[in-house]
Amino acid sequence: NAGVTQTPKFRVLKTGQSMTLLCAQDMNHEYMYWYRQDPGMGLRLIHYSVGEGTTAKGEVPDGYNVSRLKKQNFLLGLESAAPSQTSVYFCASRLPGANVLTFGAGSRLTVL
Amino acid sequence: DAKTTQPTSMDCAEGRAANLPCNHSTISGNEYVYWYRQIHSQGPQYIIHGLKNNETNEMASLIITEDRKSSTLILPHATLRDTAVYYCIVRVGVGNDYKLSFGAGTTVTVRA
């Protein structure tokens, strides 16, 4: 039981490049979330999903796209990376009605 | 949305109780208070949550004032491993469809 796994853990991009962050969970959780955390700040919700095939916008969705084709995976995409997207990205998941979010270890992205 | 106010930082001595305050004066009657913590740059970890009654688990106690406008997280015997950023969060949304917004939190440093 690995919990929530994020790949890659580190990535450096140039402005304008695209990439996808993968979040995988093996707990059969319905709900999945993507957050970003900038230095010295709390986590801000980017997008979330309440089940396979569904996605919804969070607080800061601009510049990101997501997909939830399989229940266990939640992908976060950057089509054209910008320096403002330099951040640590956290994925989380939970069961419906559950009070606990399980977080991944984070993916550190640097955009030059 | 109810917002929370926490001190930026606080120190406490190892072995002593750590009392972390949080103000949430605009909280609604059906909104829960959650506490998470983040050690180093790891993903946040759930600690405890409550609605109006005081709660206790193996990690901490949560004291919510009668008017629900503030709460205190108590770590009964702080250890060096409790050094972390502690987030007080008011859960937004009802039923299964809720989201958690993480502010800047309180940086707690436990000193030997």
Image (spheres, helix red, strand yellow):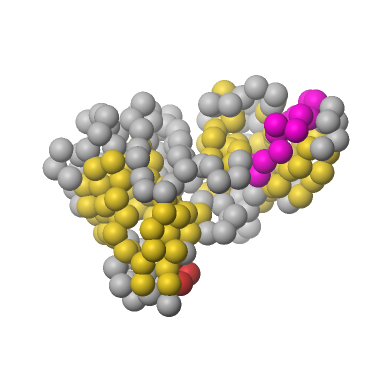
Q: Is residue A2 left or right of residue B85?
A: right
Residue A24, given in percent of the width and then of the height, sits at: 67, 45
Residue B74: % across, % down? 29, 60
* Observer able to see residue A55: no
Q: Is residue B54 magenta?
A: no
Q: Is residue A21 left or right of residue B46?
A: right
Would you say residue A104 is visible in this rendering? yes
Q: Residue at x 83, y 31 (%)?
A: A15
Q: In the rendered view, would you say B65 is above or below B59?
A: above
Nearest to the observer: residue B89 or residue A41: A41
Tell which residue pokes out farthest to the left in this image: B66
* Residue ID at (43%, 77%): B112
Is A100 placed above or below A82 here?
below
Q: Position of residue A97 (x, y in %)?
A: 40, 39
Residue drawn at the location 36% of the way across and 33% of the way down = B3
- Where is residue A9? Give x, y as percent: 73, 51
Which one is in front, A50 or B105? B105
- The quarter of the image holding the N terminus of chain A is bottom right
Q: Quadrant of residue A38?
A: top right
- Counting labels gives 0
Residue A88 is one of the magenta-drawn residues: yes
Magenta stretch?
A77-89
Q: Quadrant of residue A3?
A: bottom right
| Residue depicted at x 69% and y 26% | A64
Q: Is residue A75 left or right of residue B65?
A: right
